[in-house]
């Protein structure tokens, strides 16, 4: 007569261990994705920059300065303008300079370039080139910068708004 074997060892189920690891990995990935999509917002200003220029002569209006301690890699600048007629508003990156409003930005900026794909640091500023073929009044909201900063990416409004009067000659 053979004796029945009694195996009292506890057998672990591998399924629960795998599920636990999967949940931990998915949670970590979720936190990384959330972090990447939630950078620190950019500051806006309560002031409005005022400028005027004659018809067909561009005026350059400084609306946003770089931030101390932050370097943003710009993917684009969005500008929303309301005006009583067609007005051309072009965002530019002013390298190593700042300005309020001028018809000659070369006195204030080392270089003016298309901001898309550029780095934006504390010594730079965003400038709007405004020109119209006829008299106009343009109200420009604070610009929205699309950017990447390290792992983080976002689009936020920043800087000041502007009112530009295009005067007849």
Image: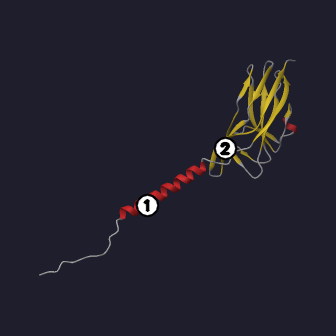
Residue 143 location (% of width, % of height): 72, 36
Please name whichever residue, 50 or 98, is drawn nearer the observer in this view of the structure. Answer: 50
Please name whichever residue, 122 or 107, is drawn nearer the observer in this view of the structure. Answer: 122
**Going 56% across and 50% down the picture, which residue do you hit?**
33
Where is 121 relative to 50, above or below? below
Please name whichever residue, 89 or 5, is drawn nearer the observer in this view of the structure. Answer: 5
Measured in 3D between alpha carbons, the distance from the residue under mark 2 to the one under mark 1, in whole angstroms, is 36 Å
Number of other residues with Cα within 10 Å of mark 1, as a class: few under 14, some 14 to 19, many 20 or more = few
Q: Is residue 145 left or right of residue 99?
A: left
Q: How is the image coloured?
A: secondary structure
* Mark sitting on residue 147: 2
Residue 37 location (% of width, % of height): 60, 47
Q: Is residue 52 left or right of residue 21?
A: right
**Going 66% across and 44% down the picture, which residue do you hit?**
147
Residue 74 location (% of width, % of height): 68, 43
Q: Which residue is mark 1?
A: 20
């Amino acid at each position: 007569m053979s004796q029945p074997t009694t195996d009292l060892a506890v057998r672990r189920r591998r399924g629960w261990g795998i599920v636990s690891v999967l949940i931990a990995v998915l949670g970590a990935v979720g936190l990384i994705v959330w972090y990447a999509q939630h950078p620190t917002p950019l500051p806006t200003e309560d002031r409005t920059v005022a400028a005027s220029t004659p018809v067909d002569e561009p005026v350059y209006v400084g609306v946003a300065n770089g931030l101390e301690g932050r370097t943003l890699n710009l993917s684009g600048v969005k500008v929303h303008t309301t005006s009583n007629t067609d007005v051309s508003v072009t965002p530019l990156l002013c390298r190593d300079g700042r300005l309020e409003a001028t018809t000659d930005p070369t006195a204030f900026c080392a270089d003016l370039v298309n901001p898309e794909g550029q780095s934006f640091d504390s010594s730079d500023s965003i400038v709007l080139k405004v020109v119209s073929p006829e008299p106009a009044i343009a109200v420009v909201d604070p610009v929205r910068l699309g950017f990447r900063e390290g792992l983080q990416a976002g689009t936020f409004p920043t800087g000041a708004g502007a009112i530009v009067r295009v005067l007849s000659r």
